[in-house]
Image (cartoon, helix red, strand yellow):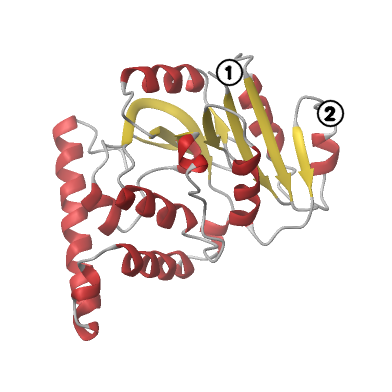
Amino acid sequence: MKISIVTASFNQGSFILDAIESVLAQNYTNVEHIILDNCSSDETPRVLARYSHLKIIREKDRGQSDALNRGFKMATGDIVGWLNADDRYLPGCFDAVLKGFVDMPSCDLLYGDYRFINVKGNLIRTRRELSFDMFMLKYLHILYIPTTTSFFKRKIFDEQNFLDINYHYAMDYEFFLRLASKGYKFGHLPKLMADFRWHEQSKSFLDIESPKEEMNKALLLHDPFIVTVPTPLRCVVRSLLMIMARAKRFVLKLLKGNYCVQ
């Protein structure tokens, strides 16, 4: 099977080398790496020029979601991965994905476990995730499905499912919630597959409130229950559901023996 990796890039020259090399390190020949660069003004163009195998589109876009959508539409692989320019895959990632789709043929999307690393690439902590759960996807205070370990069957994009470009922070949450609501099947691979880099230039670090606002917006759009709650009570109900989701996640992790991993 052919794997397409899509990376949106804007002034991530300090990290994009790691992302590119992590794809090459999979030692998988039937792969294409598509990079959508929003006319970066740092060292990104010089780094990209060193790799003749890359499919590079260097043009202005309307944000990360728009760039990723362009890459998803270009992808020719049977499986499509979403790798941020400042993240990287771990050894064996592709092997796990290929085996996962064989072992779970009904799944349309697979995701795995991951590590948090700092700006220098040093380990901060490891996060072991859980099997897909719609209740936790909707109401947890965070998105527990990491994009950096997410791989999609091509049919998701062939059936015209793309990111909503009106979302700039929680585009992944809205996308996964929409896919789940449509009945696409998610599967979890209990393997460390990628590193998520936590640094001061990342959107998650610079802005904490905007992702929360966009998650609430997406929930109102895709959750038939929450829209029935009267507006004055919606915040209280949402908080209670979040507490329940966090408790459920804690118990499930406790039962799996990885409750100490955040």
Q: Residue at x 18, y 72 (%)?
A: 237
Determine which quarter of the picture holds residue 65: bottom right
SS type, badge 1: loop
Q: Which amino acid does the dot numbered 1 rest on?
A: Gln
Res. 50 mark:
2
Dot 2, how many residues are within 10 Å of its Cα: few (below 14), some (14-19), or many (20+)? Answer: few
Residue receiving disc 1:
26
Question: In the structure shown, which secondary structural element does the residue marked by tag 2 occupy?
Answer: loop
Can residue 201 be spotted in the picture?
A: no
- What percent of the width, then of the height, locates residue 158? 51, 40
| Mark 1 / mark 2, whichever is N-terminal | 1
- The amino acid marked with disc number 2 is Arg
In this view, 52 is above or below 232: above
The quadrant the C terminus occupies is: top left
Between 208 and 56, the one nearer to me in the picture: 56
Residue contact between numbered discs 1 and 2, judged by CB atoms under 8 Å: no
Q: Residues within 10 Å of mark 1 (few under 14, many from 20)?
A: some
Q: Is residue 240 above or below residue 79?
A: below
Q: Looking at the picture, how far across and down is residue 202, in whole percent? A: 59, 54
Query: Residue at image x 23%, y 61%?
Result: 242
Residue 129, quarter of picture: top left
Residue beneath the point at 80% across and 35% down? 48
- Extreme bottom residue here? 232
From mark 1 to mark 2, how far is it between C-alphas? 19 Å
